[in-house]
Amino acid sequence: MLAVLALAWLTAFSSRSNTISVGSVLPLIQRDLGLSYAQAGLLFGIPVLMMGLFSIPSGLIMARVGVKPVLLISLSLLALGGGLRAVASNGTALFVFTAILGAGIGLVQPALPRLIKDRFTHNTGLMTGIYSNGFSVGATVAAALAVPVLVPFSGGLSWRGPFIVWAAVVALTLVAWLFVPGGKAGGGESLAPFARIFRNRVCWIASGIFLTQSMLFYILNSWLTSYYQSLGFSLATAASTVALLSAASIVFGFAGPAISDRAGRRPPFVLAGGVTVLGVLGLMLLPTQAYWFWPLLIGSSTSVLFTTGFVIPVDVARSDEVGAFTGLMLTVGFGGVMIGPPLVGFLRDITGSNLYGLLFMLAIAVGQLWLTLVMPETRRR
């Protein structure tokens, strides 16, 4: 069981490190391939769209063949797309390879909650917190190492070097899963749960919360470096804000689900919603004062919502419904994110100002707080 949990953590680490590795080197990619701000936003919008499109198919495949085959397929796509990005010679090729990577992430994320439901029956919040901590660590390491370590180490490869490194980590994770017993097979489960989940009110509220935290997280990973560069910060210092955004999630991403096993799921949700509003206001009104604090604040709140959100399907859904619940939550959450980074980039292109993008993020944060307030308690006592 420990080996399965460790590999689940590494799977989460691999999926997030390959996504977040773009943010810190985005200015280098723009300069090398001649991408506009709106085009650069697609490097975040495309994988998120693919995650949304492939989340429900992931549940359908799991219902037929089981969890392990989905993990192997998804990691194969992740390694392929992530590695090919390093050889892209133009924006079009980079977008296509990024779409392949996004499809792999879309397939893998619903599989992990089902893995927890099948293999771990107690302390599901704690187990979810442990594996989902991999998302946070992957994001932090990818953001922190990109500019100061991996780009200089890559020499002439520049921004391509980090892509090669994280694709190799995925490939190693894929090989390790081959030696793990399959666990529960799908065995041709009924597809009826997919129809039931669409009528579940809790699922739609959880999906809305997931949408808001994903939009904010990916917008900030896309544009935080550029935002602080526009305020006069160096590339290294500006890129450090992306690392700080993810660093906060290492602790709070684990703590949210673990604490919710005792306090209930709703209190961490409501607290995180309020903290997000405060963090966005800080970026708007006091961006250069304690510039490191606002990314830490938003990173902590979005990570609590992200990781605790993965416990909700395990709480309220039967085993054969977990894939459907998670798939719908991710489809809504990631599908809607497609508009976030490109829209903020478009607003920056046409106005030359960061203000309108920040107002857009504030509106998302306020909507998120409202959703956490109407979210019912789901923890079984």
Image (cartoon, grey):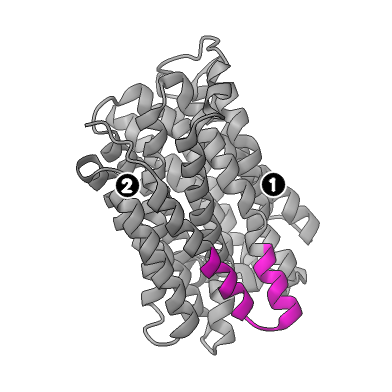
At which x and y percent is residue 103? 64, 40
For this rendering, which residue is in front, 233 or 332? 332
Q: Amino acid at mark 1?
A: Ala
For this rendering, which residue is in front, 240 or 315? 315
Query: Does 34 appear in magenta?
Result: no
Element at badge 2?
helix
Q: Tell me the quarter of the picture where residue 11 sits.
A: top left
Above-or-below relation of 165 to 81: below
Q: Magenta region's main secondary structure?
A: helix
Report the residue marked by disc 2: 266
At which x and y percent is residue 328? 56, 35
**Residue at image coords 76%, 78%:** 350
Q: Residues within 10 Å of mark 1 (few under 14, many from 20)?
A: many
Report the residue marked by disc 1: 99
Q: Tell me the quarter of the picture where residue 95 sits.
A: bottom right
Q: Is residue 165 visible?
A: no
Disc 1 to disc 2, C-alpha distance: 34 Å
At which x and y percent is residue 288? 44, 87
**Mark 2 or mark 1, which is nearer the start of the sequence?**
1
At which x and y percent is residue 191? 58, 16
**Residue at image coords 75%, 49%:** 96
Q: Which residues are magenta?
A: 342-363
Outermost residue on the bottom side: it is: 232
Above-or-below relation of 192 to 262: above
Outermost residue on the top side: it is: 187
For this rendering, which residue is in front, 43 or 289? 289
Q: Is residue 74 visible?
A: yes
Q: Which mark is residue 280?
A: none
For this rendering, which residue is in front, 323 or 9? 323
